[in-house]
Image: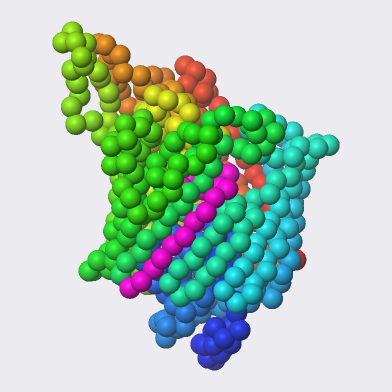
Amino acid sequence: MKRITVIICLMYIAVNIYSFPVFQDYSNFEYVDYLIKKGYIEINDNDIPIFSEKIIEKLFENNNYLSKNDINIASFLITALERRNKGKITEQMKIELLHNNSWDYKLNNRINIYWNLNSFFIETEMNSHYPYTEVTYKDTILKRIWNNSSSKMSKGYIGYRNKNIYILAGRFLPAWGRGIYDNMFLSSEIQPLDGLMFKYEKGVFDFAFITASLTPNYRTFRFDSLRKYVSFHKIGFKLPYNTYFTFKEIIIYSNNKPKWIYLNPFTLYYGVQWNNHFDDNCIWSIEMINRYVDGLTISGELFIDDFIYEKEIEALFSNFHLYAPDKIGLLINFSYTPSFIEGLLIESEYARISKYTGTHRHMEVSYSYYTDPILYSIGPDADFLIAKVKYFLSNYFIAEYNIIYQRNGEGNINEPFIEMNNQNYKFNFPSGIVENAMINKISMLYKYNILELQINAGYSMKMHKDNIPYNFEEILFFGFQGIINI
């Protein structure tokens, strides 16, 4: 009976729902992610946004394969999509209680306005926090700080969507290749970008492009003569054995206005900057995803900032040499949903970023947004390992356990490698005094209608914290969240 209900709901929503983009911060994204990895929503890439009509379309095609527990999960997701479609203005109110040596509380509020007219759509979203006392320099240019509270505009874009293409213009945060904890190409931890994006999909082929500003438009920076811009593009192919391959390229440059040669999405940025003798920051990335085995997703991404062909390059004078290290990042992850245990999702991920990856001799074109690395959030000179077990006991209750091990050397996204005579380009990884961190965390989430309740508990330990020898930190934390989606 539930299967028939799901089919009827899918048919109804497929006819009546407008398409809207689903980002990772969407409150029910964990259901979308689970059904993708289970194979019920067949999507080749790991890109965000994912459009709602594609989710509905794929669920409709695969409804005959849904297990009993997954029918409940799909039904819950369908109801959430329908509620989102009906509501033009939604609000999320969140109360957080956290015990970390002492009790603390936070009140968060998110107001989202979404409007859709056939293939066109507009979305804007504002977040506010109270109390807000951890004010940093970055906060003062990103957020409005007032009376112990903060607010920021996290989304604000206009878009167009048809069967094969979508276009977004405004403020948003996409993802090209999602990891389990974070993304190598566009971190989920950075602030939303102000720019333009389009993506075209046809059969086994897809192509995407983003151009954005990486310099704030706030008063402090308004009269800067040089600003920081970035252009991304990628091309992807679906290969045999349920394999997806993609090539990505970035160009970061500083200028008083965007360069037209980098606004061309169909050129090779490396060739353009080489032939024009520009010293801009060009980065490549290749990613491969395989879902050949039912329930198993394996993916790997190689992030190539600079791969040095010759370690020692003779300069104009024979007694002077240039030295440089390789600057690369590696991300490997897998997800497994066993068919013999319904609702179980097992995941693991390893990320490794060499010391100077993302940096540049000209600091104004480093791969950073404000002061944060745009690549994996651990930044350069670090590696990271996570194992995660998530169990959907029902569509209302999710339990999750995470264990994390992380190492951070003394490298920093704002400290470039400068080629010098007789400089040693070989060093330990991670370098210097290494901070070691271990985190164990368990959480339980309960959802019913518009209400969400979550309990988090865990233990974290850091040795040589902040790269200070024998600086030890040990924290036992406990937290509670209550969320109302109106």
Q: Is residue 431 visible?
A: yes
Question: In this view, which residue lies farthest toward the left?
Answer: 318
Question: In this view, which residue lies farthest toward the right?
Answer: 147
Magenta stretch bounds: 185-203
Name the residue at 45% across, 68% down: 165
In the displayed structure, would residue 398 be above or below residue 138?
Answer: below
Q: Is residue 313 left or right of residue 225?
A: left
Of residues 199 and 345, which is closer to you in this image?
Answer: 199
Q: Is residue 336 visible?
A: no
Quarter of the image containing the C terminus?
bottom right
Name the residue at 69% across, 76% down: 86
Residue 192 in magenta stretch: yes
In the displayed structure, would residue 329 be above or below residue 170?
Answer: above
Q: Position of residue 414 (x, y in %)?
A: 47, 26
Residue 106 in magenta stretch: no
* Residue 15 in which image quadrant: bottom right
Of residues 230 and 275, which is closer to you in this image?
Answer: 275
Name the residue at 22% across, 69% down: 240
Task: Give the colour scheme of this rendering.
Answer: rainbow
Of residues 438 and 335, which is closer to you in this image?
Answer: 335
In the displayed structure, would residue 390 be above or below residue 369?
Answer: below
Name the residue at 41% across, 65% down: 200
In the displayed structure, would residue 372 be above or below residue 90?
Answer: above
Quarter of the image containing the N terminus?
bottom right
Q: Position of residue 400 (x, y in %)?
A: 52, 56
Q: Position of residue 237 (x, y in %)?
A: 29, 63
Q: Position of residue 405 (x, y in %)?
A: 43, 38
